[in-house]
Image: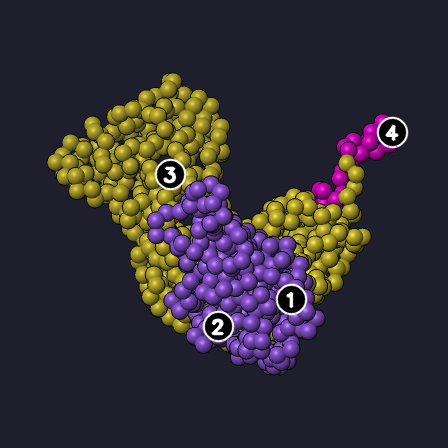
Amino acid sequence: MWGLLAAVPVGIVLLYFLKLRREPVEVPSTYLWMRTIEDLHVNSLLQRLRRSLLLLLQLLVVGLAALALFRPGLRGETSGQGRVVFLLDTSASMNATDGDDDQSRLETAKERIGQRIEAMTDEDTAMLITFSDRAEVLQSFTSDRGRLRTALDRVRATNRPTDVQGALRAADGLANPRRSSELGDVNDVQVADAMPATLMLYSDGGFDAVTEFDLGNLMPEYQAIGSAEVTNLAVVAFSAQRNIEDPTQIQAFATIANAGTTPAKSSVSLSIAGELVDAEAVDLEPGEQSGLSFAFSEDEAITIKLVIDEDDNLAIDNIAYAGLTPIKTVSVLVVTPGNRPLELGLSTPKASKICLTKIVSPDFLDTDDYANRMLAGVDDLVIFDRCAPETMPPTNTFFIGRLPPLGWSWDGEAAPVVLVDVDRAHPLLRYVDLFSLLIFEGRSVDGPAGTAALVEGDRGTVLAISARDGYQDLVLGFEVVSTGEDGGMQANTNWYAERSWPVFVLNVLRFLAGAAEATGAPSYRPGETVRLRLENATDEVTVQTENGRTDTMKPSRSGIIEVVDTEEPSNYTIAEKDRVLDLFAVNLFDRRESEIATTPEVELGYETVQGVTGGVEKRREYWRWLLIGMLGLLAVEWWYYGKRIA
Amino acid sequence: MSSTVSRSRVTTGPDALLSPELLARLERLELVSRKVFRGRMKGERRSRRKGQSVEFADFRNYVAGDDLRLIDWNLYARLDQLFLKLYQEEEDLHLFTLVDASESMNFGTPTKLHVAKQLAAALGYVGLCRADRVCVSALGPPGRHAPVLRSRSNLWKMLDYLDSVESGHNVSLHDGVKDFSIRNSGTGICVLISDLMDKAGYESALRMLIGRRMDVFLMHVLSPEEIDPPLRGDRRLIDIEDNDQTEITINQYVLRRYHETVKSFVADIKTFCSRRGIVYIPVSTETPVDVVVTKYLRERGVVR
């Protein structure tokens, strides 16, 4: 536009050059005229333009028109917007596309805020806060429209639930300053003046009433975004489980709800690792929900996806994910001179389902069979009860009352042990209550560097786990059963009589031997930080989503990784090279977010705020037509002038 | 153009060229030649040549072969030496008046051509009154039948010829003068009346006249429109002589340049003329002919 405008004066000057209609005039001789303009030819361009009043006038007109386009003016007395806090909802429901041209609600809200920002005067200040399940101050109070615009551009939609409280508190902090000290102290003055501000809430109202909040100096204005008439079918729950009786059988349960305001029906399809497995149809009235169940068999680690096929106003809740870790039977070699409690623990119904146990005496360690077995790598776990091999086997080990041959040492003498601390967070000790335990004789153990203490006694660590070349060694500092002086079996602890014993043995099988859990992978909300403990010590793992996004992460020394970037609903597969270590799913599963119909009013503090749907009066620009009119006028004037002079 | 035609019709009347009052004043005038020329017939002016007349001029020694009739016998008686008595020869003067009849002369109110004709007629009449040999001629084809006139009674012949001369004979000054020179031998006074607007230049024509040992007078006729043109704005100038077209935007600056050009044009002619002994007389068509003849020409010493 500006380039076109700049071409106009050039065009006028050119018209002067190209003006062909010259008045013919007869002169006795052009002899003298030729001589006159002979040396003017050098600067003929300039001499033609010199002192042409019409040209000057036209250029002046065009120049003034160009100046007028800058909308010059003096700032008069205007009623500005004052201080404004823009609260912009970026939660999942704002992704609903019920606006014009499939525009999402967030885009609409951003447009409206943009119009507000444009309408701001130099005296007005504004701040921009976005909120989903957390509030973010994108721009604190400023009158710089450019910075507000940039901040607004940075706003991205999220798939998170809504929590308006944090955002309100952020706005509140600036509008209602707290007193710095106590009331009644005359020497104490408030540090900051209260700054009344307009609170512009751009949301669809998809959050619970905020009651524990006082608006104070904030004047709320609720800009309702979106429409009250929506279609939305949502998966509000989805999980998959292996059948305990038959681990290859998997059952998936889903709850589909009609969170819209119109009846909806659709087909729901279930796919495993991208392949369609099953489908069902749902037909729901508004507010209704229905449960679906799917059954199929699979013994690998799988990722399951449930899709509502019909398009509706909110896409994110049309897909749900679930994952299942692989089912696997583990093989355990028990080297023991005889340990009845251990044998019992390994033969519980649950344990026997997931493990194959072979019990041998310590003599077996010297045979070729043992060496071959270790070379073949058949066993997932070797339990050494009161015995130790000469070299560590290439697998996970559990030493009871003995130390592994390398790197471990006793710390102190054998004595009765009182347990002090148990790491309940560790999967090995999950659901295990040890404080009623009696231990007659035990010693504290000291493992190599990187050893994690799981159970602390009064004299030191009695249960510790250490990583070794990708395997893990669990060392128990006391015997469960001892061989008495008469050669008979003698209890060293009452653990075998506790309920925690079979649970502990099962945990050992599950996590040390690597047997999978029957339940499905956990599901998290979008944006939640997922903290996982990896059983296998690895240097580097990859976190992969359904659509192929791959992150490489380094687990901490204790095998913990924290997956932060969980914005996208998907199955997240944590793998080391090709081996799946863990799985989790991220799903919206929030009925409140799925109910995307815009509420006509919201309750903030103790005020009910009615929604306003209109935007600010948008400036309609007519200057283009005026400019074209001016140029047309100029052309007509030129034509008339040319005609008159001829 | 129509106005120009009607104007020229008005000026075709014989009495329009010279008014009776002017004729009366012209009778008292006489052409002055700075050089004394040999005429063909005995005239009314003294010649440098010694010869047959009543006016004594000088004596000189007798040499063998001299006409015995011219010997001053009285001196011979007194001094016993032979002397010849020399007499002043009286002879006529040749006056050539050349009128540029190119189309460019047909411009202005009155036209430059008309003014030129008036001047030619006035000078011719002066010559006729003094029994000089007068040849009023237009440059170009009409000059071929220009009459050679003597005596006052031939005034009407001269005026008739001048009336018959129309503009439009676009010969260059050089060609016109060359044509004239070929046809008219002999020396005399040559008055060239022209606007000198010749794109080929006027210098060669004037040089040719000087080379004929003419006493050259140049009357430069310019109309006021040429000296200060009343033109402004974007114009296409058309040369009425050769239809040459020049596009020009006339503004103050260009006008100033034009005035400078006119000035330098006139100054150049003046310099050229003064170096070669040509009398240059600028004539504006605004100035009445009688003023030009009785005042300017007198001041310049063309007539007395």
The residue under the point 50% across, 61% down is: B91
Separation of marks 2 and 3 at Cα, in angstroms? 129 Å
The residue under the point 69% across, 48% down is: A126
Disc 2 target residue:
B148
Separation of marks 2 and 4 at Cα, in angstroms? 135 Å
Badge 1 amino acid: Leu
Inspect this view and state whether residue A212 appears: no
Colour chosen for chain B:
purple
Disc 1 target residue:
B26
Dot 1 falls on a residue whose secondary structure is helix
The answer to which of A130 and B131 lies nearer the viewer is B131
Give the crowd class for mark 1: few <14, some 14-19, many >=20 residues within 10 Å: many
Q: Residue A186's mark?
A: 4
Quadrant of the drawing holding the C terminus of chain A: bottom right
Separation of marks 4 and 1 at Cα, in angstroms? 127 Å
The residue under the point 39% across, 38% down is: A555
- Image coordinates of residue A245 in percent, x first then y, are 35, 59
The answer to which of A489 and A309 lies nearer the viewer is A309
Badge 3 amino acid: Lys
Disc 3 target residue:
A554
Give the crowd class for mark 2: few <14, some 14-19, many >=20 residues within 10 Å: some
Quarter-of-image position of residue A496: top left
Discs 2 and 3 share one subunit? no
Separation of marks 2 and 1 at Cα, in angstroms? 20 Å
Q: Earlier in the sequence, mark 2 or mark 1?
A: 1
Q: Residue A412's mark?
A: none
The answer to which of B50 and A591 lies nearer the viewer is B50
